[in-house]
Amino acid sequence: MLSVRQLQASYGAAQVLFDVSLEVNAGEVVTLIGRNGMGKTTTIRSIMGLLRPRGGEVRFDGAAVTGLAPYRIAKTGIGLVPEGRQIFPTLTVEENLVATASNRTGSGRWTLDAVYDLFPRLKERRSNLGTQLSGGEQQMLAVGRALMTNPKLLILDEATEGLAPLIRAEIWSCLKRLKGERQSILVIDKNIGALASFADRHVIIEKGRSVWTGTSEELMNDTSLKDRYLHV
């Protein structure tokens, strides 16, 4: 479904990505992991067109999308839950969800009712403004907003950053449920143990290069791998 090959990207004269390659197949959950500053978010920004790659290729559903405008990439079927949530603070929960909906006519898997079923707390808070939500509720809203685009692929950048343990567990439960429904997911997060419990594969990035790809079992059983690439 998503194929990234030898991706390169820069901020001005400073090159950040040198050689990143990864794949996400239909119905698969893949993680992008590594220490801070290694290029994970830059990879997501390059995939989504928020940063124009300087080299390599991004293909989605068989079509090249490298360097297209972000709205065009989103329209191909990629929903992004960005780092920092970036909800609309002066809109209500329901307005946030409807604002990005691809199914205003009622068609599609993800409707308001479906999102409220996934996150009952959002239904309780549906009339509250974005600024009146807790961090965890804002993250649920960001996930729900991305789902309302009815994406073929859901991308989450720092899925549980800064959230309380109970809220993190709720987000993981949501992702496991989505996996059970064959939703394709690419996720960045630091909670390796939680990710390993449901992800199909993991891609480690080190200094702007993808240096390892493997299963959860391989990742959790290789202490030297975790010490080399994932520990500070």
Image (cartoon, grey):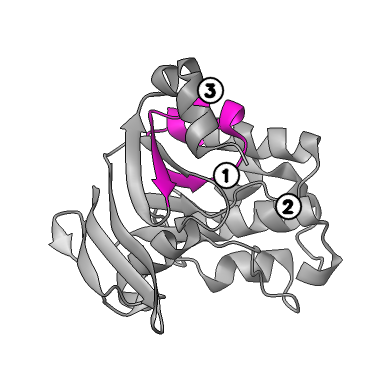
- Callout 2: helix, strand or loop? helix
| Residue 173 quadrant | top right
Bin the neighbour count of mark 3 within 10 Å (Cα to Cα): few under 14, some 14-19, many 20 and up. few
Which residue position is annotated with label 1?
A: 189
User: Gap in Å between the C-alphas at discs 2 and 1?
Assistant: 23 Å
The stretch of residues the image draws in magenta is 177-206
Name which residue type carries label 2.
Answer: Leu
- Callout 3: helix, strand or loop? loop
Point 29% across, 73% down: residue: 53
Position of 33 compared to 213: left or right? right
Which residue position is annotated with label 2?
A: 122
Position of 201 compared to 65: left or right? right
Residue 186 lies, in percent from the top left, at 42, 46
Residue 208 lies, in percent from the top left, at 39, 57
Name above or below for residue 135 compared with residue 212: below
Verify whether residue 6 appears in magenta: no
Name which residue type carries label 1.
Answer: Asp
